[in-house]
Image (cartoon, rainbow, N blue to C red):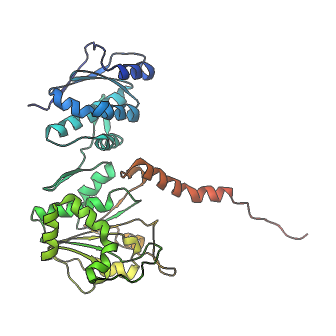
Amino acid sequence: MSSKASVRKPSLTRGRAATAKRTEAAQPNGGGEPLVVFFDDIRLVRDLLGDYDANLAVLEDRLGISATVNGNAVALRGSDDACAAAKSVLEQLYGRLAQGEMIGVAEVVGAIRHTRVAEVDDGAVSMPTAQQIRTRKRLITARTPAQSAYLQSLQRNDLVFATGPAGTGKTYLAVAFAAACLEAGRCDRLILSRPAVEAGERLGFLPGDMREKVDPYLRPLYDALYDVLAPERVERGLDTGIIEIAPLAFMRGRTLSHAMIILDEAQNCTAVQLKMFLTRLGEESKMIVTGDPTQVDLPLGKDSGLNEAIEILRGIEEVDHIAFSKADVVRRELVGRIVEAYEAAPKEQAAKAPAPKTGGKS
């Protein structure tokens, strides 16, 4: 079955009643001729639109267009640029469905985010392709342009720093990329590490062997690993040492060759610790260092070495830095608003603070 979509501009009969009402209320071009996109497979169109047309509703809301569905045709009304962007999003998502990928609201939002950096030429939108990682368990698609840039950087460079707020996919994509490399035979082992630093609270004495003692600190890495690899593959890898998850302190004195190496929560490393870790990089290895400089949990008197390392190594060949922002939060939109509120709080407090008194006794 072909996945090709074509565009024509015939008259279109009325489609969904609910959408028709939105079209009438939100038509920015005054009811001009719609841009109509036709698809070949009606079954894929149903998946494209989503349950109760939820995917299409997101497209309308985010791009400021209105859409009417009639069978395998979708009529778009709005500004020329917005309609061209919507057409491009629909065609890309349809193509992904034709390849067997599942499409939901998150995928629609991700495709729309990529349109923000698209180029428009004579009404045609050239939208950057969302980068993908495929493991035997799942296909992961970048949901923002920064995530696509991140995956491209991981392909090209041997040391990549990824910084930004929580929920931007820094760690998850790093683990997914590393897992895909392991399955493809591009490395011999996976090494995932974190500094064992408490996030403000005292955990006290932890019983059990060494793995049981440090596992609470490393749990996010396990979660990501089990999400992209089959459980039996993870367990077998942990038992044989092909997959190693260990605290930062276990890295001293080692040379890590033929491996994918990830250091998570690197904002909780001092400059000395981070230098130690970075110099573990051996032959035919790649290293990914992730962290959020705004969430440092180091004790008073100890400074994070993450930003310093990024500045020191800036400009060195095969070293790159991807900086995520609140616009890249994909965990859920509320997390993005939380990050934005925390970023704005210091500015608001500074604005409300009384002006310093000046002058003295006359």
**Which residue is rendered at x = 57% and y = 57% of the image?**
345
Rendered location of residue 36, percent (x, y): 26, 21
Figure check: 77 above or below 338? above
**Which residue is rendered at x = 12% and y = 65% of the image?**
186
**Which residue is rendered at x = 15% and y = 60% of the image?**
230
Residue 32 figure quarter: top left
Figure check: 359 above or below 117? below
**Front residue of this view, candidates 50 and 272:** 50
Count of residue discs:
0
Rendered location of residue 273, percent (x, y): 36, 81
Indicate the quadrant containing the N terminus: top left, top right, bottom left or bottom right: top left
Instruction: Please indicate, yes or no, whether residue 160 appears anywhere in the rendered image.
Output: no
Rendered location of residue 192, percent (x, y): 25, 72
Figure check: 50 above or below 217? above
Name, please, the residue furthest toward the bottom. 253
**Which residue is rendered at x = 16% and y = 69% of the image?**
235
| Left or right position of 121 against 25 | left
| Left or right position of 79 against 189 | right
**Front residue of this view, candidates 339 and 5:** 339
Name, please, the residue furthest toward the front. 207
Residue 74 figure quarter: top left
Rendered location of residue 19, percent (x, y): 36, 23
Residue 279 figure quarter: bottom left
Instruction: Please indicate, yes or no, whether residue 257 appears anywhere in the rendered image.
Output: yes
| Left or right position of 250 against 293 | left
**Front residue of this view, candidates 300 and 275:** 300
Indicate the quadrant containing the C terminus: top left, top right, bottom left or bottom right: bottom right
